[in-house]
Image (cartoon, rainbow, N blue to C red):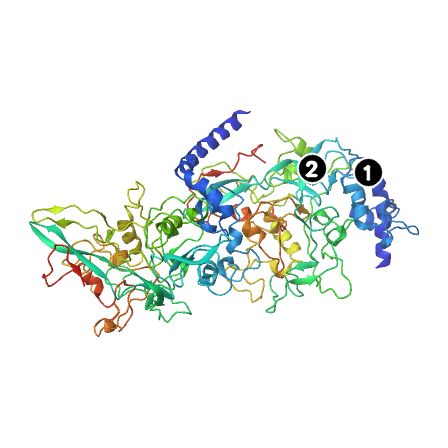
Amino acid sequence: MTGAAAARSAAIRAARGAAHVALVTVVAVIFLAAWLATGATPAGADGGPHVASVNSGADTLTADGCAGCHRAHTAQGPMLLAHPEEEEALCLSCHGSAGTGATTDVETGVQYALGAAGIRGGTAAGALRSGGFVEARIDSASPTRISFPRIQGSDVVTTFSSRVGVLAEPAPVTSAHLALPTSSVAEAGTAWGNGVEDSGPGPNADLTCASCHNPHGNRQYRILNPIPGDGDGPLVEAGADASITDAALPSGAGAAGVRNYTIQDGRTLQDVLDAGLGPTAGDYWRRYLPWDGVPTWNGTVIVPATGVAGDRPMYVPGSATNLTAFRSQISAWCSACHTRYNAPNSGATTPSGDDRFAYRHTTQRTECTQCHIAHGSNAGMAGTVSSAAPYPDGSPSGSSRLLKVDNRGTCQQCHDPTGTIPYTGVINP
Amino acid sequence: MRRWALLLVGGAVWLFLAAIPTLADGGPHVAPANSGFSTLTADSCAGCHRAHTAQGAMLLAAPSEEALCLSCHGADGAGATTDVESGIQYTVAARTTGSPVLGALRNGGFVEARIDSANPSRVTYVRNTAGDTSQRTKVSVLASGQPVTSAHIAFDGTAVVAKGIAWGNISGTPGTTFDPASNPGGTVSGMTCASCHNPHGNGNYRILKPIPAPHTETGDTFAAATTDIAVTDAALPPQDADGNFTDVRNYTVIQSKGGTGTLLASQVLALPGYTNLMGDYFHRAVPWDPAVDYTAPPPSGVTANDAPNGLASTFNGQINQWCSQCHSRYLAVTTRPYETNSGDAIFTYRHSNTSNKPCTTCHVAHGTNAVMNGTFSQARTYPDGSAGGTDSRLLKIDNRGTCQACHDPTETVPAGTFYGPTPSPYTP
């Protein structure tokens, strides 16, 4: 070997060393994804063509998944997508109500069990965390609430945990982040709160599935784009990445290799099926896991909660790898678009300086997904006041704003502004 | 026309005898001889034609055109350095099984190819001042041939399926004329060597026909191009005082930056550290890895475009135009064709052929051994909607690794990251 060649080899080794560090961090994902890449679709394994380590080249430079969605010369959609018209058509070919390529049906808000052929079966496993774009299964009319004590200064005050259950049959959505042709949702087309202070209600935005998700995978929770957006303005896209930690890809066979996308506990679809609670189990509110595992009052002191405070998607009791950073991360992510909704704990009492989003509910202690779902909600806004509540631009709207509870029941899930409910485990209604 | 053809035939005679097996390049295919430009007593006509005892159409000495071509260029041929069945070039024309191999042919082979399609190597680098990253990839050479999985001609004994459609072919201006009705392309009745090559020579790179012509019969709908496309050739190899060639062209994937250092077999053999496993089938950039700081845009000129003819500034554009003579609607050199609707019912949005990624970046012309065994790749239909099976579409990398050769859609790979095996030799 010549001196120049040796120097080059050393440089290559150094560069490879750096790459190796990155590889080590995803080594588990890589091995699992190798299986997934070949067995994913239509074999029902999780990730399908969306596994980052496959599409990035980390574990193979002969990926197959590209052909699942793209055509180089005969594409029917922009960005060389195989399907015509809208990007949604391609996504829904697997993830729609008529799709069979994925267990998740984002149109009707349900995750199915695997069928005999290893693809989507006909049995519902549970309701999707983010609802659905056409129908959702949120029992928004019938929340249940339990009071518990909380220290506030030198006082013990009342707060609440709630449970928002699951409907046996889906109901049409009343708001959604996408207005699919098959839904009755009227898309406002406005990214509320996006932009700098005093920049109005927000610019227009044209959302697609890929506005929020990177279908190629990116190691983020739910393959969320670190910088969401529509790519062509006038939406003001974030200047920095918003990272959301993901759980490791599941490694099992069959349903054990499929993630749990429902509101039930469990890391995998198999966990959900093994629990045997049925498709109407779970809690859309998730302030405590379980909802009633709250602190109690023994007459003298507060007894610590038996449950876990705060939402953790794909929660496994006792696991060291639960997504404990989820709440703060998801608020930061949502705020990448809804910039001026991001509010400190003092936001309700301290003016932001913005003439429109002046005082704001905290998004720190209460994450965005505590009150809202991401895809679509069937919550009803039939009340006189709720049905007339204007959008931030002043236009009237009966939209349910992706809330999980009818009317403004959302407020009541944590607050008793009357001060009449004791913190002694009172269950309402 | 007949007179012109006779002139060609006459001129070829001399060349044929002079060419084989004396290692001379061009064989009976040199235009000046066959055209009559250099002689009107050519000998080489007799190498391929019989005036009265021909065994094949067009007075060919062999039963078929392929049989004739393969008598020199086939695996058992001994009249040319190039074995287009096995996808290799030998160092001598009078070759036998044990003859030294110069390298792997750029265009693969019709029966076997030596493309290491399963093991590409890739480096991620910063391509512009905004910090955007891209990838550069090498597809190496196998030590032995593997059965082809797609080819432009379906030879007996291969798994290649002749679909009889020139995909994307349409009457009109390539890249401009489209069809709002579903029209996968003009039908043809077959492909032969002479569909693309003029065996008499014509001064074009690889004696490519300015207007390629698949075999058609009554009822076929293939629309031939109407405008010549030239692909500039390199100069012929040097000749001795008697006019005999003293060197052979390099038809392999072994290429130095700019191509001028590897136009001839002798230049290839003289490369430092030469082995016949050298070469990069992807050749989007030559060399594939500039081996400079990957975290900043490469300095101008550190690599060059693909240039098998030694003309790095023009080859890509010319070969694009030439391929599009038949595959008209694949030509996508307009602005952002991947997000601009062409108006065609099938070729609606199309991958760009610009920015140093012509047709020959992703595809070989003869045949490839790339494997399409992935779930999605196997499920891909042809443009007419029929099942594509494991047809590899002349791609150079297994499944859809071709996409990954340039793209990281996850945006998770930092500059300076290497994936894949370390090529050996590393370059070229």
- SS label for mark 1: loop
Q: Chain of mark 1?
A: B
> Which residue is at 52% across, 25% downward?
A3
From the image, tell me which residue sits under label 2. Answer: B264
Q: Against A99, is B255 above or below?
A: above
Figure quadrant of the C terminus of chain B: top right
Q: Against B201, is B334 above or below?
A: below
Dots 2, 1 in contact, CB < 8 A? no
Q: Taking B67 as reference, is A46 left or right? A: left
- SS label for mark 2: loop
Instruction: Name the spot of residue A349 as percent of width and height, x first.
Output: 13, 58
Q: Chain of mark 2?
A: B
From the image, tell me which residue sits under label 1. Answer: B20
Few, some or many C-alpha atoms within 10 Å of disc 1 (few <14, some 14-19, many ≥20)?
Answer: many
Hey, which quadrant is residue B294 in on the image? top left
> Which residue is at 27% across, 63% downward?
A403
Closer to us: B406 or B403 = B403
Instruction: Name the spot of residue A382 as percent of width and height, x first.
Output: 25, 73
Tell me which amino acid carries mark 2. Leu
Same chain for the residues at labels 2 and 1, yes or no?
Answer: yes
Few, some or many C-alpha atoms within 10 Å of disc 2 (few <14, some 14-19, many ≥20)?
Answer: many
Looking at the image, which residue sits at the far right? B52
